[in-house]
Image (tube, rainbow, N blue to C red):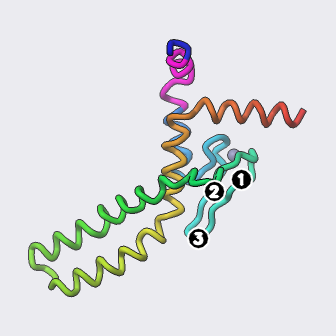
Amino acid sequence: MTGRSENLTELGLLPRLKVLGRCLSVGCPRCGRRPIAGLFSFQTRCPGCDLLIDKGNGFLLGALPISYVVFIFIWLFPISAAWFVKQIPYPVAFGLIAAGAVVIPLLVYNYCKMISLGIYYFFMLAELNETAKKDLSDES
Ligand SMILES: [Zn+2]
C-alpha cells in the first residue's frame, strides 16, 4: 500500500492534469499529437507515438454514460425547462427530445471517448509511463 501511494506522489497531479487536458483537446494522452478524434473518425493508434488508444473489449465504454450525461445537460434539461415554463408546446418538446436522444450522442460520441480516455489515464498515469518505456525498449 505504501509503495503504491509513493508511486502516485512521484507522478504528481500536474502530469495527470496535463494528460487530461491533452485528451480534452482531442490530443494523444502521451505525446499530445492531435487530432486523435474527429466528428466521424477515431484513431485506434496514435500516429505520433504509436500509443494504442482503443484497447478494445469495452476499454472506452465510459464514453456511453458520458454521452448520456452530455445529452441530458445540453438538450434534455433546456428543452424540458422551456416546456415547463410554457415556451414550447409538449409535442414539440417531445419531438425535439426524441430526435436529440438519437442525434446528440452520435455527434458527441468520439469526443466522449476522449473524455473517457482522459479520465482513465488521469488515474492510471503509471500505465502510460510504463507503455512508453516498453515501446522505447522495443525500438532499441
Ligand atoms: Zn501519441
- The secondary structure type at the circle numbered 1 is loop
Per the image, the residue denoted by label 1 is 45
Residue segment shown in magenta: 4-15
Q: Residue at x 45, y 60 (%)?
A: 64
The label nearer to you, 1 versus 2, is 1
First-in-chain label (1 vs 2) = 2
* Residue 5: percent from left, percent from top: 50, 18
* Residue 63: percent from left, percent from top: 48, 56
Crowd class of label 1 (few under 14; some 14 to 19; many from 20; radius 10 Å): some
At label 1, the amino acid type is Arg
Residue farthest to the right? Answer: 140
**Label 1 close to label 2 by CB (< 8 Å):** no
The alpha-carbon separation of the residues under discs 1 and 3 comes to: 16 Å
- The secondary structure type at the circle numbered 2 is loop
Residue farthest to the left? Answer: 85
What is the number of the mark on residue 40? 3
At label 2, the amino acid type is Ile
Per the image, the residue denoted by label 2 is 36
